[in-house]
Image (cartoon, rainbow, N blue to C red):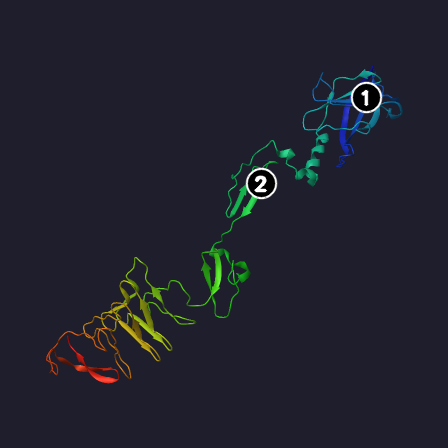
Amino acid sequence: MWKKICGLIAIIMIQLIFASTVPKMLNYQAKLTDTDGVALEGNYDITFRIYDVESGGTPLWTEAHSGINSVSIVNGLFDVILGSITTLDIAFDDTYWIELEVEGEILSPREPLVSTPYAFRSIYADTATYADSAVYADTAYIISSGAIQTDGISITGDGTETDPLSATLGNTIETEEITDGTILESDLNVTNDPTDSYVLTYDSGSGGFLWAEPGGSGTGQWEDDGTGTYARIIGNDSIRAYKSPSASYGIYAISDNVGVYGKSTDSIGVWGVSTNDIGVYGYSTNDIGVRGSSANDIGVLGTGDYGVHGAGNEYGVYGFSPKYSGYFTGAAGGGCIRLPVISPVGSDDPTGDWATASCYYNNELQKLRIY
């Protein structure tokens, strides 16, 4: 009877091959003696078996070293490469035992494999082939969809093959996160090309930005003091106002000085249009409610039931010009205006009095008639 006096001297890994076509192998060393303790010498047929149970059971792997592959024993010592004949395809992820059969006699008890063979598991860490695969992690779900919360990054998925992780960067930044002078035009969603003196404005239709002329359409800026609304003409109208159905005034201004002031070198300084009420309304406690001046055309133009309506403690409507302070036309009478009677000053007409004022009609000087 054979006696394995040093049942398992060492089991060490001598080769790790990562290619799937080349088997993994183990170096197995041991010492055999007979029942009297005499070390064996010569060549012996030895069969190796690996089990996942200490006794009984079915071998997970078997390899016979016999014939030309018999084991050479010198002074009881032998060294065998397990897996050199039969592919060693065990996962080494559990506890295993090795059993030897020498010349037909099974030695007992089985010897447990020490931890070195488990180094085969490093194959899954040393190669990107396994590191990139979810197969070896699909039984340990530690991440659920939406479980990772970060500032500015959204991570979804549970890490499985059917629901891989996906990260989306945030699309907003805070002002303090931007270094001064680092934002370029290419960083903005601008839908057109700029021209000199244009300004950048927000376009609600596209959700981006537009280059536009200064003083274009839109809401003006209110200030605590200084000019309430100021517009500098670039192309066409400086200020043009249209009232909505629910509003009464196209432009409405109240000021301690000038309520609305318009000036134009070629056309209309202030122009207001209303279909139901007042086109331009100005009110001032100390000065002029509405004032318009023009070098070449009309200072203030009004149309409607009342072209220009003024109410004041001193002057309802005040006009100044190097030529005519006021010019009036009406369909009811040539150049006539309607005034309340203040005091009669004489009469050339038995039906009414004449005021101390005059106007021109058909290029002839006319007196103003009081009704």
Closer to viewer: mark 1 or mark 2? 2
Q: Position of residue 101 (x, y in %)?
A: 80, 19
Q: Residues within 10 Å of mark 2 (few under 14, many from 20)?
A: some
Circle 2 — which element?
loop
* 126 over 221 or under it: above or below: above
Q: Is residue 211 left or right of residue 252?
A: right
Circle 1 — which element?
strand
User: Residue at (31%, 68%) from the top-left corner?
Assistant: 272
Q: Which residue bears the numbered disc 1?
A: 47
Quarter of the image for residue 301 reads bottom left
Amino acid type indicated by mark 2: Leu
* 78 over 235 or under it: above or below: above
Q: Position of residue 357 (x, y in %)?
A: 18, 82
Do callouts 1 and 2 mark residues in contact (Cβ within 8 Å)? no
Q: Which residue bears the numbered disc 2?
A: 165
Q: Position of residue 342 (x, y in %)?
A: 12, 76
Q: Is residue 258 left or right of residue 36?
A: left
Q: Is residue 113 left or right of residue 253?
A: right
Pick the front one: 160 or 281: 281
Quarter of the image for residue 32 reads top right
Quadrant in which the C terminus appears: bottom left
Amino acid type indicated by mark 1: Thr
Choose the circle earlier in sequence order: 1 or 2: 1
